[in-house]
Image (cartoon, rainbow, N blue to C red):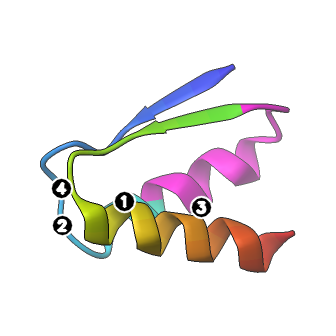
Amino acid sequence: MKVIDVRGLSYPEPVMMTKNALASGDAAYEVLTDRVTAKENVARFAGNQG
């Protein structure tokens, strides 16, 4: 499992880091965030990617 630590980062960095991780082809991911907005943005992005 790949861990993506986006704590303390603001938009668009969490989404871009998640996008780069998805492009790497790993099967499982865990995104660590400390902001509700980042969580929502990453979840929305990941949902749109399938």
- Residue at figure coordinates x 58%, y 54% from the top left: 20
**Residue ID for mark 4:** 9
Q: Which mark is residue 14?
A: 1
Report the mark closest to the observer, 4 or 3: 4
**CA gap, disc 4 and disc 1:** 6 Å
- Left of 1 or right of it: where is 6? left
- Residue at figure coordinates x 21%, y 46% from the top left: 34
Q: Is residue 21 magenta?
A: yes
**CA gap, disc 1 and disc 3:** 9 Å
Amino acid found under the numbered disc labelled 4 = Leu
**Secondary structure character of the magenta stretch overall:** helix
Residue 36, position as x, y percentages in the image: 28, 63
What range of the chain is rendered magenta? 17-28
**CA gap, disc 2 and disc 1:** 7 Å
Secondary structure state at the residue bearing disc 1: helix
Q: Can you tell which quarter of the image residue 13 is in?
A: bottom left
Q: From what the image shows, is residue 37 above or below residue 20? A: below
Amino acid found under the numbered disc labelled 2 = Ser
Q: Residues within 10 Å of mark 2 (few under 14, many from 20)?
A: few
**Is 47 in front, or is 13?**
47
**Residue ID for mark 2:** 10
Residue 9, position as x, y percentages in the image: 18, 55
Mark 2 and mark 1 residues within 8 Å of each other at the beta carbon: yes
**Residue ID for mark 3:** 19
- If you read the primary sequence from the N terminus, does the residue marked by circle 4 or circle 1 appear first? 4
- If you read the primary sequence from the N terminus, does the residue marked by circle 1 or circle 3 appear first? 1
**CA gap, disc 4 and disc 3:** 15 Å
Mark 4 and mark 2 residues within 8 Å of each other at the beta carbon: yes
Mark 4 and mark 1 residues within 8 Å of each other at the beta carbon: yes
Secondary structure state at the residue bearing disc 3: helix
- Residue at figure coordinates x 61%, y 74% from the top left: 45
